[in-house]
Image (spheres, grey):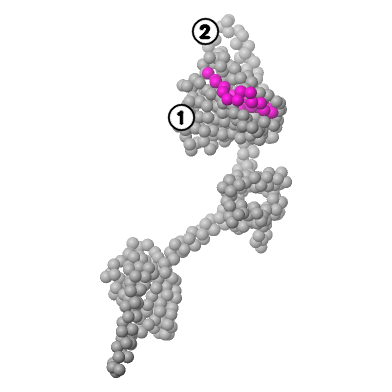
């Protein structure tokens, strides 16, 4: 046997291992480099080149400190001391480095010491966790923002009734600091009885992807009554429905709204008496028109028209006041929908300017407050006449849908922009661009929506700019 054979075998195995290492070092997706005891970079792979944004020629020969964030340079000094002064074989650290484009990268660093030709080197692997670091920073900022705001974030598991929550949740309810878990019953117990029942009913009916939007009153542990607004969305997680949402203290807003409603109610009632007297005087003048000249007759007619507008505005304000005070009583009777519509729209068709065409299930019947339903229809028709005045045909479609009846009023007017549709039924909202072009306070649709809600029905609108609008409502048959 050749006496040099063992040496040759060892050499071949060494070269084979070295080739493998070189191949792994070059092609691995993990950023890697080799450094000496001065922390000078001797060798880099493509992954590190991609991470730093420099070429290999720009990196080799530089020192790690050249890329370290100033406040983290001491970490690399700790590595140098541990491996070359104290002889530790492995050292790990988290570091922040600066890329060529001046952006920062956070990396987990693992350095293994090895010896070659009586000289010690370090093989360093850098694992980029910048995304995780950014997420943690975002979560900290979000947590701080939530902690210092009036908003509470919570998640309700409807299957188990458990609630996860932020600190703001405890602050809102005024519960003890050491409270860690809560359940649905705990939360409902904090609500005023009436509102607790309504909230529980809403939660029982919620479905996956359904939205929660609820306002109610809570009583904190120390007896303070607050108004809160719950908003959230339901989703199905592992077979259980969970609602993730927010809860906001809206007490100040509700108190301000109550003060405004009180003012409107008082002002409306106080205006009613002098307006009634003024209206009677104008009606008396109307009967004496033939005794006046042409100009006076014109002024009397105009004054009566203006008085009618003022009366309608006051009626709207009084209706809103009654709605808010819960004084809107429904007097339900059994009637045919088409007959009610014909009765309330007769004056429009009789004038001969607009044509109202009633189609669909003209025999449909419901049990509802006929006067209030007519009020909704008139409101929809008046809007069609006001905003779609160039097209003189208004179509009213009646649809018998087994358990409910749907009434739709369609015009061929300019249509409504999509972003305005969600606000059409809000108080005092007006969709027209030029607020001075049309009269009204923007209360008609709000009142209509409240009337339909009192009947346990639904209300909505379908519209596209340039394609007209269809306002609709549904009413249960019983």
Q: Is residue 18 left or right of residue 74?
A: left
Look at the image and give the residue range highlighted in magenta.
355-381
The crowding category of the residue bearing disc 2, from other C-alpha atoms within 10 Å (few below 14, some 14 to 19, many at least 20), is: few
| Residue 269 in view | no
Q: Residue 466 lies in what quarter of the image? A: top left
Expressed as whole percent of the image width and height from the top left, the position of residue 56 reads: 29, 70
- Residue shown at 59% from the left, 20% from the top: 345
Q: Check disc 2 and report its element: helix, strand or loop.
A: helix
**Which quarter shows the N terminus?**
bottom left
From the viewer's side, name the closer residue of 433 and 412.
412
Where is 154 relative to 12, above or below?
A: above
Q: Check disc 1 and report its element: helix, strand or loop.
A: loop
- Residue shown at 64% from the left, 32% from the top: 402
Residue 294, label in figure: 2
From the viewer's side, name the closer residue of 332 and 190.
332
Q: Is residue 226 left or right of residue 412?
A: right
Q: Earlier in the sequence, mark 1 or mark 2?
A: 2
- Residue shown at 41% from the left, 67% from the top: 128
The crowding category of the residue bearing disc 1, from other C-alpha atoms within 10 Å (few below 14, some 14 to 19, many at least 20), is: some
Q: Is residue 197 left or right of residue 63?
A: right
Q: CA distance from mark 1 to mark 2?
A: 43 Å
Q: Residue 475 lies in what quarter of the image? A: top right
Expressed as whole percent of the image width and height from the top left, the position of residue 140 reads: 51, 60
Query: Circle 1 is placed at which residue position?
Result: 467
- Residue shown at 64% from the left, 42% from the top: 255
**Which quarter shows the C terminus?**
top right
Question: Is-magenta flag for residue 371?
Answer: yes
| Residue 10 in view | yes
Residue 251, label in figure: none
Q: Are marks 1 and 2 in contact (CB under 8 Å)?
A: no
- Counting every numbered tag in the picture gives 2
């Amino acid at each position: 046997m050749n006496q040099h054979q063992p040496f040759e075998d060892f050499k071949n195995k060494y070269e084979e291992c070295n080739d493998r290492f070189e191949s792994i070092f070059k092609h691995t997706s993990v950023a890697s480099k080799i450094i000496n005891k001065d922390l000078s970079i001797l060798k880099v792979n493509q992954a590190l080149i991609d991470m730093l944004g420099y070429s290999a020629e720009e990196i080799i020969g530089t020192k790690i400190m050249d890329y370290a964030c100033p406040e983290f340079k001491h970490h690399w000094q700790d590595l140098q001391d541990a491996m070359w002064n104290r002889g530790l074989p492995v050292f790990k650290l988290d570091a922040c480095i600066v890329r060529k484009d001046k952006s920062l990268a956070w990396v987990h660093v693992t350095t293994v010491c090895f010896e070659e030709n009586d000289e010690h080197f370090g093989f360093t692997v850098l694992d980029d966790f910048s995304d995780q670091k950014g997420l943690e920073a975002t979560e900290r900022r979000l947590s701080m923002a939530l902690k210092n705001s009036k908003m509470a974030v919570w998640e309700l598991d409807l299957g188990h009734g458990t609630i996860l929550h932020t600190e703001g949740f405890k602050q809102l309810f005024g519960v003890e600091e050491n409270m860690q878990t809560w359940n649905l019953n705990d939360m409902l117990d904090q609500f005023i009885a009436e509102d607790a029942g309504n909230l529980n009913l809403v939660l029982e009916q919620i479905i996956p992807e359904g939205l929660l939007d609820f306002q109610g009153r809570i009583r904190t542990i120390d007896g303070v009554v607050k108004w809160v607004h719950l908003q959230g969305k339901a989703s199905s997680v592992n077979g259980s429905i969970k609602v993730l949402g927010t809860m906001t203290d809206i007490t100040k807003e509700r108190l301000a709204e109550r003060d405004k409603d009180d003012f409107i109610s008082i002002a409306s009632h106080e205006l009613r008496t002098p307006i009634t007297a003024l209206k009677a005087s104008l009606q008396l003048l109307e009967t004496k028109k033939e005794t006046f000249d042409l100009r006076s007759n014109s002024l009397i007619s105009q004054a009566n028209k203006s008085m009618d507008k003022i009366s309608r505005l006051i009626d709207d304000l009084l209706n809103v006041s009654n709605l808010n005070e819960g004084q809107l009583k429904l007097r339900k009777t059994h009637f045919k929908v088409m007959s009610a519509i014909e009765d309330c729209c007769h004056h429009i068709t009789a004038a001969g300017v607009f044509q109202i065409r009633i189609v669909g299930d003209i025999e449909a019947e419901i049990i509802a407050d006929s006067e209030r339903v007519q009020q909704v229809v008139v409101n929809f028709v008046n809007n069609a006449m006001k905003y779609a005045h160039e097209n003189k045909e208004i179509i009213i479609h009646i649809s018998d849908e087994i358990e409910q009846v749907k009434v739709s009023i369609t015009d061929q007017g300019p249509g409504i922009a999509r972003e305005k549709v969600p606000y059409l039924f809000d108080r005092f909202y007006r969709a027209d661009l030029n607020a001075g072009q049309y009269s009204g306070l923007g209360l008609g649709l709000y009142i209509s929506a409240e009337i339909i809600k009192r009947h346990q029905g639904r209300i909505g609108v379908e519209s596209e700019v340039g394609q007209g609008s269809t306002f609709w409502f549904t009413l249960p048959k019983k």
